[in-house]
Amino acid sequence: MKLIILDRDGVINHDSAQFIKSPEEWKPIPGSLEAIGRLSEAGYRVVVATNQSGVGRGLFDMDTLNAIHEKMIKAIAAVGGRIDAIFFCPHAADSTCECRKPQPGMFREIAQRFNVDLTGVPAVGDSRRDLVASAALGCAPFLVLTGKGEQTAAEADLPEGTRVFPDLAAVAHHLLGLKTTA
């Protein structure tokens, strides 16, 4: 099975320091939906692993989070893609849970749910915590320069083997062996 794990905010959609608190605030990064469509068409199972501390902070509730994800799923479906599963941590940033990235709990759950070894599975994020969590289980870390990515590339000590790309569309081109048209 071909699998790819994506962070949400800053990878698929624009991020916000004030959190994405409603479906209206969820706006895709240009090219990200089509990239997921191409990955889906190529046989990839696309999984999202996202910290959503806004739930734990009381900024939005589970119904709102579900509505945001429903908007994302419909937008991706409209371009021929699909999300096979969404894993999220609803806990606040000061939580000691195992699921909040940089802890690898969400990635362990993905491995168990899909009954796969994550060694070499591409995991795309825009922050060091995304990459650290995925690398802990052997994923191949990909940093995108969207969202917090440029700041992360400049400041962070990235996991060994991290590959850096401008955005999710460039990651998809790389994984699918496509030539860029730029």
Image (cartoon, helix red, strand yellow):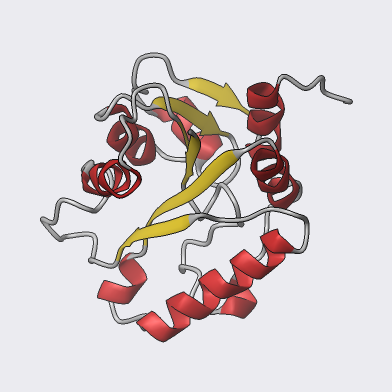
Outermost top residue: 161
For the point 70% across and 37% down, which residue is it?
169
Query: Looking at the image, is 56 positioned above or below residue 181?
Result: below
Which image quadrant is residue 104 in?
A: top left
Query: Looking at the image, is 162 positioned above or below residue 113?
Result: above
Q: How many marks?
A: 0
Q: Please state which of residues 84 and 134 is positioned toward the viewer in this rendering.
A: 84
Q: Please state which of residues 1 and 124 is positioned toward the viewer in this rendering.
A: 1
Outermost left residue: 96
Can residue 53 be seen in this snapshot? yes
Can residue 125 be seen in this snapshot? no
Left or right of residue 85: residue 89: left
For the point 30% across and 50% down, which residue is it?
113
> In the picture, which quadrant includes the C terminus?
top right
Where residue 51 sits in the image (x, y, percent)? 35, 57
Where residue 11 sits in the image (x, y, percent)? 56, 47
Query: Looking at the image, is 83 positioned above or below residue 163?
Result: below
Where residue 36 sits in the image (x, y, percent)? 66, 46
Q: Please state which of residues 60 and 175 is positioned toward the viewer in this rendering.
A: 175
Where residue 102 sits in the image (x, y, percent)? 26, 42
For the point 37% across and 23% down, which residue is it?
158
For the point 32% across and 46% down, which residue is it?
110
